Each structure stands twice: as structure tokens, then as C-alpha cells.
Image (cartoon, rainbow, N blue to C red):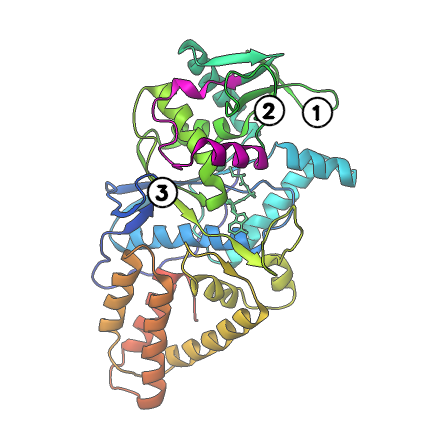
Amino acid sequence: MDSWEAPDVPRLPGAGRPLRLYDSATQQIRPTSPGPEARIYVCGITPYDATHMGHAATYIAFDLVQRAWLDAGHSVFYVQNVTDIDDPLLERAAATGQDWRDIAQRETQLFRTDMVALRALPPREYIGAVESIPSVVRCVQELQRRGCVYSIDGDLYFDVSSDPMFGEVSHYDLEEMTALFAERGGDPLRSGKRHGLDPLLWRAARPEEPAWDTELGHGRPGWHIECVAIALDTLGMAFDVQGGGSDLLFPHHEMGAAHAEVMTGEWPYARHYVHTGMVGLGGEKMSKSLGNLVFVSRLREEGIDPMAIRLTLVGHHYRGGWEWTDDGLAQAQKRLALWRDGAALASGPSFDATLERMREVLADDLDSPRAVAAVDRWVDDALARGGRDEQAPALMAAACDALLGVRLG
Ligand code: 5CA
Ligand code: ZN
């Protein structure tokens, strides 16, 4: 699939620090240790509706990860999928009388324009589930060779007991896993399963459902194997970060690790599993199924500056869940105006220490609220007292652009 247009990222003097991130698997903040090229896979959208603030917050968090790596001198190999065939798309198609392919194409294109507006770095590989079917088939065949696949009426299941490390990513107990599995697309109660948690690798064709003819039969891919096939084709094992919202911790990322590790006989699938907190609205998780949504595209249509949206997002720590409010957006709009005033000054106090502070706090598990606070302090000082450093306002603008993705010019 086509990715989207890349924003430019100014180079800053000096270099950023090694990035440390909270890893769900080891349940601690650990240094990332990428090679010259950092490798990151971020789970993409299921394109049956427009991008809401929860999605945006998640993608912007992983954008900050990449900006920290770039600033520390790495190049980045970024991969993202699009789940362009799955139950929610078919349900939306049935409910609205549209073709599921048209919905997927339209919403994916809207997502691209939202990401461009928010200055999110584009993935180098942007890959749809449909186009990765041949690769999914090869993965399932490899799992079959290793004896960990069984069939119920043509539906192919992965035997979780074939993975001795199962549970390593989420650390949930059986009861929690079963509840989450049922809530998030799984079928723990289906009769004939060896283990209730065994996930679907391949779904045999049902009447009226799209299906593809493959060596696995007539059907369509399961969800977790889709991401594994795409990640292993592009990044290979032991890539640096597997990213997504906390609702993907289980089953999606647990199953992904299990599939990949059993399939390759190697460990680990990812070196860090990084999860963002859920953004809510009116006391509930913002979700397409609940319908309590604020869309990026809607705000853009209303004339809201995308940089104010981005500043609202980076004003919250990526791991703490938070509520989207009009007031939060209004505060970010005020802050953006002040930052622009600061950037437009002919001179100001030196920005060097503030830049180092931004790098320090961002390297510390991506503490963007503290980076924002550091910029606030410089701006307050510059506007109240001025300064003689003629480079400082431009350096401040470049730092906000490169590290936070907030362009002031
Ligand atoms: N296509 C799959 C991943 S392979 C999927 O989960 N798609 S999604 O459209 O439902 O979600 C896209 C991303 O947004 C996921 O990382 C998900 O965890 C994240 N997300 C969804 N709702 C929220 C929310 N309210 N707050 C923060 N992140 C969210
Ligand atoms: Zn995924």
C-alpha cells in the first residue's frame, strides 16, 4: 500500500540520549538498544471508521519514539499494517450497504491525511492484510510443519500449549486472559478447541463473506498471524519495538509473540513490547464500538490547527490513560500561540539547557509532558525578560519540530 508523505525533521546540534522505554514483557523501564537502524512495528488501524483521538495519541506516541531514535543518530525502519479485512469491516459494510473494500480504502486514505496533518513520520512499509495473504499462508504452513495447528471444520487454530513462553508478554492469569480473549475477538467457548485460548489462524469461508483460495483452503486470515507475517517479512525476529495501545497487550501481542517464536524457534519476537494508555471521552474508553468519538478529521474540518491537536496529545504521558476534553484542546491552542510568539522573537535566553532537558526527559520513557513544561519555561522567560541569544528562538522552534513534531513556523 502507499504510505504517506514524510514531514521534514530538522537536525539539532549535538545528539539525543539512548532511549529507555517501559517494556510490558519485563514490566520495567529498560534501555532500547537498536543497531544503526532501529526496527519498529506499530499495529495499524482497522479501517472501518475515521481516526479518533485515541488512535492519534497512540500513533503520535510511537512517532515520538522514532524522533528520539533519529535524534540519537539512528535511522529507523518503521512498519505498520492495515487490517483491511476483518469482522468489524464486514459488519460495517453489512450495516451501511457499502462494499467493505470501499470502506477500507476510504478510511485508510483519511487516516493518511490525518497522519500528514499531524506530522507523523510515515512507515517505510505500509502493508494491508489482504496483500499479505500469501505470506500468512506460508506462516501457517510453517506452523503446521511444526505440529501446532489443528482444524475445526476448516478453521485453523494455533495450539497455545506449543509455546512454553505463553504468557510472557501480558503476565495475565488464565481468568483474565479468558475474559479479554472473549472481549477482543476470541472464541474461548467454541467446542472442539484443545484450549479455550487457542486463536484462529485461518477462517474458512462462510456464505456471503469474502474469501481467498489458498493452500489452506478457501477462507481469510486470522488477526494475530497477519501482523506476524508482515513483521517477519520486513523486520525479522528480535526487532526493537512492537507497539500498540494497551488493548492489544492481550491477546494480540501475546499471540503474535507465540506464533513468531514457535514458527521460527527463535526468541524474542520483539525486544520491547510498548503499550499506550487508553484515551477516553465522558468517562469511557474512546472506541468505535461505543461511538464516543472525537475525530481528527472533524476537528480539522472545523479549522482547528493540527499542531494544537498534536500539542494536546504530547501534553499527556503516553502510558497514563487520559480524557479528551475541549478544555484540554483550548489550553493547547493557547500554549501553541505562546510558543509561536517565543519562536518569532529576534533573540531570547539561550535554549541549550532546555534542549538538553527535553532530550533527558524524552529519553526517560518518553516523558513528553515534562518536555512541554521545559519549553513553557523557556517561552515564559523569553517573553517576560528577553535575552541576547539570536540563535535561540530558531533552535527552540527546531527542537519542538524535531523532538515533539510540533511545527511552529
Ligand atoms: N488493526 C488492529 C491492530 S493490528 C487494531 O487494533 N486496529 S484499531 O483501529 O482498533 O486500533 C488502532 C490502534 O489504536 C491500536 O494500537 C489500538 O490499541 C489504538 N487505540 C484504539 N482505541 C484507543 C484509545 N481509545 N486510546 C488509545 N489508543 C487506542
Ligand atoms: Zn497488529
Q: Secondary structure at mark 1?
A: loop
The residue type indicated by label 1 comes to Glu
Per the image, is 177 magenta?
A: yes
Identify the residue at horizontal 32%, vertical 48% (top origin).
Answer: 22
- For label 2, count other residues whose C-alpha is less than 10 Å away and answer few (under 14), some (14-19) or many (20+): few
Mark with earlier residue (3, 1): 3
Marks 2,1: beta carbons within 8 A: no
List x then y, in percent, for residue 150. Answer: 51, 12
Q: Nearer the viewer, residue 377 or 385?
A: 377
Tell me the quarter of the picture where residue 274 sits.
top left
Q: Which residue was labeled with disc 2?
A: 189
Q: Secondary structure at mark 2?
A: loop
Give the residue furthest to the front. Answer: 175
- For label 1, count other residues whose C-alpha is less than 10 Å away and answer few (under 14), some (14-19) or many (20+): few
Q: Nearer the viewer, residue 96 or 282?
A: 282
Q: Which residue was labeled with disc 1?
A: 209
The mark closer to the camera, 3 or 1, is: 3
Q: CA distance from mark 2 to mark 1?
A: 23 Å
Identify the residue at horizontal 20%, vertical 61% (top origin).
Answer: 14
List x then y, in percent, for residue 361. Answer: 28, 62
Identify the residue at horizontal 31%, vertical 90% (top origin).
Answer: 385
Q: Which residue was labeled with disc 3?
A: 24
Mark with earlier residue (2, 1): 2
Q: CA distance from mark 3 to mark 1?
A: 36 Å
The image shows residue 202, relative to residue 52, as above or below, that is above
Q: Nearer the viewer, residue 181 or 15?
A: 181
Q: CA distance from mark 3 to mark 2?
A: 28 Å
Q: Quadrant of the C terminus?
A: bottom left
- For label 3, count other residues whose C-alpha is less than 10 Å away and answer few (under 14), some (14-19) or many (20+): some
Q: Which residues are magenta?
A: 157-184
The residue type indicated by label 2 comes to Leu
